[in-house]
Image (tube, helix red, strand yellow):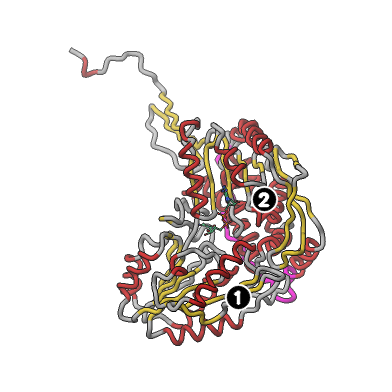
Amino acid sequence: MGKGFFNVPVAINEPVKSYAPGSPERDAVLEAYSTMWNSHIDVPLYINGKHITTGDTKTMSAPHDHQHVVGTYHLAEKTHVESAISTALEARHEWANLPWEQRAGIFLKAAELIAGPYRAKINAATMIAQSKTVHQAEIDAACELIDFLRFNVQFMTDIYHEQPESTSDAWNRLEYRPLEGFVYAVTPFNFTAIAGNLPACMALMGNVVVWKPSDSQIYSAKVIMDVFEEAGVPPGVINVVFGDPVMITDTIMDSPDFSGLHFTGSTFIFKELWKKIGNNIHNYKTYPRIVGETGGKDFIIAHKTANAKQVATAISRGAFEFQGQKCSAASRAYVPSNLWDEVKNYVIEDVKSFKMGSPADLENFITAVIHEGSFDKLAKYIDQAKTDSDAEIIVGGNYDKSKGYFIEPTVIVTTNPKYSTMCTELFGPVITIYVYDENAYSETLKLVDETSEYALTGAVLATDRYAIQEATKALQNCAGNFYINDKPTGAVVGQQPFGGARASGTNDKAGSALNLLRWVSPRMIKETFVTPTDYRYPFLGE
Ligand code: NAD
């Protein structure tokens, strides 16, 4: 920027469309779904703006109908990854030197493309690839991704505005340089918005990117790339490779120019990647930035003064929307004995009223879990709960993978507050409830704090202000996103910056300036107007 201090459009959250019967958006998404369902796409690698087909392919199918193939995608060999790295580094010079308003223009345009012409397509792709209901697809693939793109432009300019003091004889300027080298985005299956945001926000700050999406999200990743291409992301700035994650990651992390990891996914994998970076640390030209948002074992604790219906609704929505596959999904709840009978009846009633099936039928609230590995893991825990003496399944507990990976929403009640499903992240439609003595609130808060290695989200429900304050303090380190009288899911960009601590991640808060700051390396420039010509200071005088 050299010819004006430009203001960017004030970011606003994209309104969520209703998809109610008769609405135009409902017709549009169902038409897009049907077209995509009945065609076959071939997804290439994206390297240097070129679509690379390798001939080594895998098929893509929908979790709710695993025999129905909707396309194929191409797998990278090591040479493709190397080419993605070198192409990114070549693109860096021009991209890093492009005035920020040009980068902003590209990503603001991407937001508007998703809000308009690509909305039905990106939602339908997310319904097919990740089995989201239309509402879950809308709040993720459309609204949250639009919000990330719009708000990040505003956060970028907020960062650029942060400047040091100057004096009349020295002008101090902070320049927010992109990282030297290239950065690596590794994204999870569960949010199309996260998949788009991780590479995009780093590119927005002037970085060049190699992006490896999840194998279970490739259909919607392709739509994201269609949008980025139409919005004008130049060749080489965001390169996409699919395939063996270990080979891809090893190739990336062996490069001396690797300068940052932007990861969202499971805790174990993140720790493995961190270890690889540590092992290679002597080879890098710069210390790589490491940002990882990972697993959770998110809680709801109700106080004896809470409203039972509100507690039940927080459980039903917080645990089961998108089949419990949100990193923020409630998966353990602590309910006081005085409310239990009421809460139990409401939750059972809710769960029994859920309809389960394909997201193409808009009456379904629950669809399939993401893949067979997840299905088998969940079935194993459910079977175990059926035989354990300290656990009881009060609703759900059935599963069927003959057509799609369907797991019935399941509520386990345990008498053991450290029961395995109170501690382990299952990432599915299963919640475990521990009923505590209504007079043992303080002890139960301690239990909440000590039960899991994670600290992502959590919620307290109470009407007593002292109880709310006690939980807020006692659970200070248990959740990066803490909710009072609400479910622990549904963070909105610009309103609730998202991320957790402990084993849940580096807590760099996606959807805020804090995250963008990780992708710049500030350079301080001091310009002195009257440069001294004599080394002697006055105190040296005789
Ligand atoms: P995952 O860890 O299986 O995969 C995430 C990414 O890592 C994928 O791209 C995958 O291909 C890649 N990967 C897998 N093994 C790898 C390896 N050995 N080396 C390099 N890359 C590898 O996670 P997932 O199942 O896609 O997503 C679910 C997980 O993500 C859950 O644990 C959830 O809590 C977490 N999550 C966290 C947040 C957050 O903000 N904290 C948000 C979304 C998801």
Residue at x-position 46% and y-position 53%: 505
Q: Dividing the image into 4 quarters, which one contains the N terminus?
A: top right
Whole-percent x, y for residue 403 in the image: 72, 70
Of labels 2 and 1, the one closer to you: 1
Viewer-closest of 119 and 131: 131
Of the four image quadrants, the one with ligand 1 is: bottom right
Neighbor class of circle 2 (other Cα within 10 Å; few <14, some 14-19, many 20+) is many
Whole-percent x, y for residue 418 in the image: 39, 69
Separation of marks 2 and 1 at Cα, in angstroms:
37 Å
Which residue is labeled 1 in the image? 408
Apparent side of residue 392 relative to residue 216 in the rendered image (left or right): left
Mark 2 and mark 1 residues within 8 Å of each other at the beta carbon: no
Neighbor class of circle 1 (other Cα within 10 Å; few <14, some 14-19, many 20+) is many
Q: Amino acid at mark 2?
A: Ala
> What is the magenta range?
4-26
Q: Earlier in the sequence, mark 2 or mark 1?
A: 2
Residue at x-position 52% and y-position 40%: 260
Apparent side of residue 443 relative to residue 453 in the rendered image (left or right): left
Where is residue 170, by image quadrant? top left
Apparent side of residue 69 relative to residue 93 in the rendered image (left or right): right
Dominant secondary-structure state across the stretch colored magenta: loop
Against 295, is 82 above or below?
Answer: above
Q: Is mark 1 within 8 Å of ligand 1?
A: no
Which residue is labeled 2 in the image? 110
Viewer-closest of 23 and 312: 312
Apparent side of residue 327 relative to residue 33 in the rendered image (left or right): left
Badge 2 element: helix
Residue furthest left in the image:
542
